Amino acid sequence: MNANELRETHAHHVLTPWGVQGTLNPPMIVRGAGSFLYDSDGSRYLDLASGLISVNLGHSHPKVVNAIQDQATRLCYAAPSFFNDARAELAAELTKLMPWNESGRVFFTTGGAEANEDAVKMVRMVTGRAKILTAYRSFHGSAPGAGTLTGENRRWVNEPGIPNVVHFWTPYPYRSPFHTDDPKVEVERALEHLELVVNYENSSSIAAILLEPVVGSNGVIVYPEGYLQGVRDICDRYGIMLIADEVMTGFGRTGSVFGHTRLGFVPDLITFAKGVTSSYLPLGGVMVRESLASYFDDHALMCGHTYSGHPMSVAAGVATLRVYREEGLYERGREIESWLRAGLEELQRKHPVIGEVRGLGSFFALELVKDRATREPLVEWQGKSQGPMPAFYSELRKRGAHTFGRYNVVMVAPPLTVTRAELDEGLRALDGAFASLTVTA
Ligand SMILES: Cc1ncc(COP(=O)(O)O)c(C=O)c1O
């Protein structure tokens, strides 16, 4: 098939996630190398989204590609009930990254949604409690269970969903649900609100609170200092487990190994996916502190998937973690952060449509507004229309860069291997795309 026939075939025979199928017109990506993607017409795009905030090593890192090739010649699949060498090696490497003053264990899944669902099952089994509290403006996956945990409109199609999931509000300084501009007051009120929810939901029926350490696809919202530590304290007061959803924030994205290491709090379980293999192969999992994991020494662990700890994926994971270590990538986000913050704030000075620049590590978002004083969103959050955003992303691609966003939020999260020159190229493309963005009242 030639490129046009392939486009037609894709449009007519592939159902693409999250989109109104008739309106889609993305490039046909055929190759990736480093920070760039290449399409079937030979155009190249700087990947300012790291895939789905997940290709942390950039595209086709040769060391990981080689490891996948080697594993394929040795063993493509073994049932998860067997022990496996690569799986043991990856679990040992992940254990070294755990934050506990005790050991821990890993349960492997195929991706992030399954990881969150399995974490929920585990805390329900261990505590004998049923309720799970999660935040509004969160995303935890699209399968029905993880979709119920999600706190925005991607949950709605799952409703009524799984029972015993309750949502609460978390800090969002730019649009405070707690009616304050003072981050300290925001934290106090958010924690007071959470504790009220905990009490009114019957604290002794709550198994866990599940949170993204930095809110990801709902706008890269960095919680003000003290909030996550305060959530930890509430969990301790009521015997509630704290699950950190590190699917997007894990493996160097925030300028530290994990979001919780950057933000200074200690969860009881950690879910991960994406960056563990730089997304080269599907893999996720749950890290569980030893004092909880040992519960399953004499109780059956009622979780399992055909691809749990898939040998190809875990081999990719071992190689990926080695590259993070060898190339100092867990910390590299700090350097990218300083470049990105300065570059994006410069764009904000030029383009009034950029209401707020926020983020950390290699994980930033631009929140777009019609008017900086009123903060009226350029596109209504969870509304039906995407307004000028599809045209903006298309213009950005014409200028040689790609990213994605949701409603009035544009993600800027390049791979951890991005160079300064590449980043400058991306900032110039963003500058041009913002210059052509039409803002209508
Ligand atoms: C924070 C968070 N949790 C969970 C998920 C779901 O992961 P997956 O798509 O691998 O199921 C995502 C995906 O973007 C995510 O950002």
Image (spheres, rainbow, N blue to C red):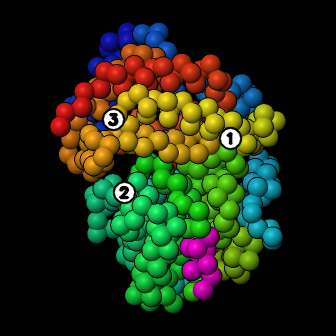
Disc 2 marks which amino acid?
Arg
Q: Which mark is residue 131?
A: none
- Distance from the alpha carbon under mark 3 to that under mark 2: 16 Å
Q: Earlier in the sequence, mark 3 or mark 2?
A: 2
Farthest residue toward the left? 441
Residue extent of the magenta highlight: 229-237
Q: Looking at the picture, which amino acid does disc 1 mark? A: Arg
Q: Which of the 4 quarters of the picture holds residue 15?
A: top left
The magenta stretch spans residue 32: no
- Position of 404 with respect to 44 (left or right) is left
Residue at image x 70%, y 50%?
257
Q: In which quadrant is the N terminus drawn?
A: top left
The answer to whether residue 426 of the structure is visible from this angle is yes
Q: What amino acid is found at the position of numbered circle 3 in the picture?
A: Val
- Label 2, secondary structure: give it: helix
| Circle 3/circle 2 CB separation < 8 Å | no
**Is disc 1's CB within 8 Å of ligand 1?**
no
**Side of 421 relative to 371 (left or right):** right
Which residue does the numbered mark 3 point to in the structure image? 353
User: Mark 2 = which residue?
Assistant: 175
- Give the percent coordinates (x, y) of residue 331: 73, 42
Q: Is residue 363 above or below residue 431?
A: below
Report x, y in % for residue 59: 61, 27
Determine the residue positioned at 61% across, 32% down.
339
- Say above or below: 375 vs 43: below
What residue does disc 1 label?
334
